[in-house]
């Protein structure tokens, strides 16, 4: 009674307040009548029901399983509150109940409706189910171990370098399918990966490209491509004479040469491993010059832009 008195007092305060309150009262009254009429008649509603299949450990599905079923049901309006305010119970299907014995897991419309009736409101009527049936290929054959081929292009920034080979978390995977398909599969490939202008070691999970009619386990592998910054260095290297005949000695002036190069940061304290070489067979004895060419011999794979401070040295030959 107090509430009604308060509303009446508000309505008497101003025409605007009275109009708003009257409008709200009609809305409430209309909602009550609508709810009464709706909740006491049949209403149709679409419900998403998750699907789960209990598989034996040695069985692998070769076709995609629908994540959910769209189930259209009719029921009294007031009962739909139970659908709206609770999480849908998953539909769990036992593999042994629907294995047709020929490599297919099949559940037709009638069996789907029967299974759904067990998890929905007992008063609900199932009108339709989409997809209308479940038809999935499977295999119980053991997996075939095949190598993984990576499809990767990696380019570091100009002052960085690839320092070492690509590292994979595993070099092979298992492929599951029927006997004929397995006989034709001898390797698998990752999706294409391309990274440029890198300044740090690349770590990435890459997915195995799908194979029609087969499943791969695991579906992805981890890769690592080591990247290091390059540092400019200079060192003095002893020149080595090669192919000199027995009994002859070639003396060089100077006997060493400065070499400049760029190396990864982790190698800056290592011996360079670079050699400078004079080849006795390259000496032109008909020339009036007593100079011979110096060229670079061995170069560690990690080094770049290797250069000698000069390309020739003087020589004399002594006989023993």
Image: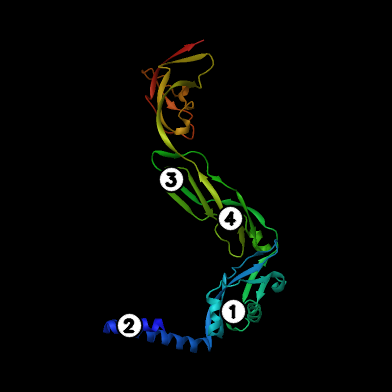
Residue 300 — which label?
none
Q: Is residue 175 above or below residue 286?
A: below
CB under 8 Å between discs 2 and 1: no
Sequence-wise, which precedes: disc 3 or disc 1? 1
Residue at point 48%, 20% (across, down): 241
Q: CA distance from mark 4 to mark 2?
A: 81 Å
Q: CA distance from mark 4 to mark 1?
A: 34 Å
Q: Give the residue at mark 1.
A: 132
- Helix, strand or loop at disc 3? strand
- Helix, strand or loop at disc 1? loop
> In the rendering, at what x and y percent does residue 318 appear?
47, 11
Q: Give the residue at mark 2.
A: 9
Q: Give the residue at mark 4.
A: 188
Residue 155 — which label?
3
Q: CA distance from mark 3 to mark 2?
A: 79 Å
The quadrant of the rendering that contains the N terminus is bottom left
> In the rendering, at what x and y percent does residue 248 appear?
50, 14
Q: CA distance from mark 3 to mark 1?
A: 50 Å
């Amino acid at each position: 009674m107090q509430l009604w008195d308060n509303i009446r007092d508000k309505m008497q305060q101003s025409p605007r307040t009275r109009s708003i309150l009257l409008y709200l009262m009609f809305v409430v009254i209309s909602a009550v009548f609508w709810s009464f009429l709706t909740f006491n008649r049949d209403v149709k509603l679409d419900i998403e029901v998750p699907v789960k299949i209990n598989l034996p450990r040695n069985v692998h599905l070769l076709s995609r399983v629908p994540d959910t079923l769209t189930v259209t049901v009719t029921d009294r309006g007031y009962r739909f509150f139970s659908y709206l305010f609770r999480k849908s119970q998953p539909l769990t299907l036992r593999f042994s109940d629907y294995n047709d014995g020929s490599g297919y897991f099949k559940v037709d419309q009638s069996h789907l409706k029967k299974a759904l009736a067990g998890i929905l409101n007992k008063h609900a009527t199932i009108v339709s189910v989409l997809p209308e049936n479940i038809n999935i290929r499977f295999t119980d054959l053991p997996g075939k171990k095949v190598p993984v081929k990576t499809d990767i292009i990696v380019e570091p920034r100009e002052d960085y370098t690839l320092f070492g080979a690509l590292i994979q978390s595993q070099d092979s995977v298992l492929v599951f399918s029927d006997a004929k398909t397995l006989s034709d599969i001898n390797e698998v490939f990752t999706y294409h990966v391309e990274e440029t202008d890198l300044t740090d070691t690349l770590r990435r999970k890459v997915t195995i490209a799908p194979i029609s009619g087969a499943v791969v386990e695991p579906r992805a592998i981890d890769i690592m491509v080591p990247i290091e910054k390059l540092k400019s260095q200079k060192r003095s290297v002893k020149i080595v004479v090669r192919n000199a005949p027995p009994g002859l000695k070639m003396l060089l002036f100077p006997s060493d040469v400065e070499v400049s190069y760029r190396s990864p940061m982790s190698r800056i304290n290592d011996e360079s491993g670079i050699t400078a070489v004079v080849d006795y067979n390259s000496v032109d004895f008909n020339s009036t010059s007593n100079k011979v060419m110096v060229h670079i011999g061995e170069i560690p794979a990690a080094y770049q832009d290797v250069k000698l401070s000069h390309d020739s040295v003087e020589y004399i030959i002594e006989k023993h």
